[in-house]
Image (tube, rainbow, N blue to C red):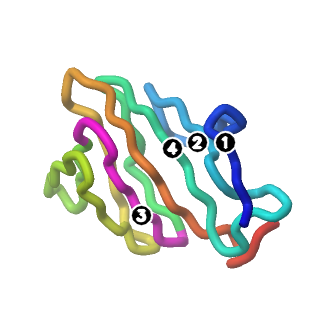
């Protein structure tokens, strides 16, 4: 078992994101997960990401607040404990259109399918 305390999570900058603080909860460390990493993102009101796509799938889990996910011009609002999977190559935009901070977990596979 590999334990990483929230106090030890490191901040990271995600490309094409604004109004967000990202923390790496698991991943990229010795003894950590082999296939994916887990981020914790805190989006301020008006914060978001995209539009863009990645060559790998990702999973979003809203822990608190709400996040609007836009794909092909269709908006879907995720609320607390809602989740979605974004397939590889799908262009998405996410925005916190509320007046509250949105806290979200993000699960993303490592490039090339294994821990660097």
- Which residue in the structure is indicated by mark 1? 5
Q: Nearer the viewer, mark 1 or mark 3?
A: 1
Q: In this view, does 13 lie to the left or right of 102?
A: right
User: In the rendered image of this protein, does residue 53 appear above or below residue 11?
Assistant: below
How far is mark 1 from mark 3, CA to CA? 22 Å
User: In the rendered image of this protein, does residue 33 appear above or below residue 6?
Assistant: below
Q: How many residues crowd mark 2 within 10 Å: few (<14), some (14–19), many (20+)? A: few
What x and y, as percent, mark residue 47? 36, 29
Asked if the residue under mark 3 is in contact with the one under mark 4, i.e. CB atoms within 8 Å, the reply is no
How far is mark 4 from mark 3, CA to CA? 12 Å
- Circle 4 SS class: strand
How far is mark 1 from mark 4, CA to CA? 13 Å
Q: How many residues crowd mark 4 within 10 Å: few (<14), some (14–19), many (20+)? A: many
Asked where in the image residue 91 lies, by quadrant, the reply is bottom left
- Which residue in the structure is indicated by mark 2? 14
- Circle 2 SS class: loop
Asked if the residue under mark 2 is in contact with the one under mark 3, i.e. CB atoms within 8 Å, the reply is no
Query: Which portion, as a residue range, is magenta?
Result: 55-66
What x and y, as percent, mark residue 25? 62, 48
Chain-order first, disc 4 or disc 2: 2
Q: Which mark is residue 40?
A: 4
Chain-order first, disc 4 or disc 3: 4
């Amino acid at each position: 078992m590999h334990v990483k305390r929230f106090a030890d999570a490191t901040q990271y900058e995600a490309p094409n994101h604004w109004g967000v603080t990202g923390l790496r909860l698991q991943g990229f460390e010795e003894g950590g997960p082999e296939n994916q990493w887990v981020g914790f993102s805190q989006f301020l009101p008006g914060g978001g990401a995209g539009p863009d796509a990645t060559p790998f799938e990702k999973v979003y889990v809203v822990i608190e607040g709400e996040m609007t996910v836009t794909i092909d011009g269709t908006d879907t609002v995720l609320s607390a404990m809602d989740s979605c999977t974004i397939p590889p190559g799908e262009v998405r935009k996410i925005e916190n259109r509320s007046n509250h901070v949105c806290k979200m977990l993000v699960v993303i596979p490592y490039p090339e399918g294994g821990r660097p």
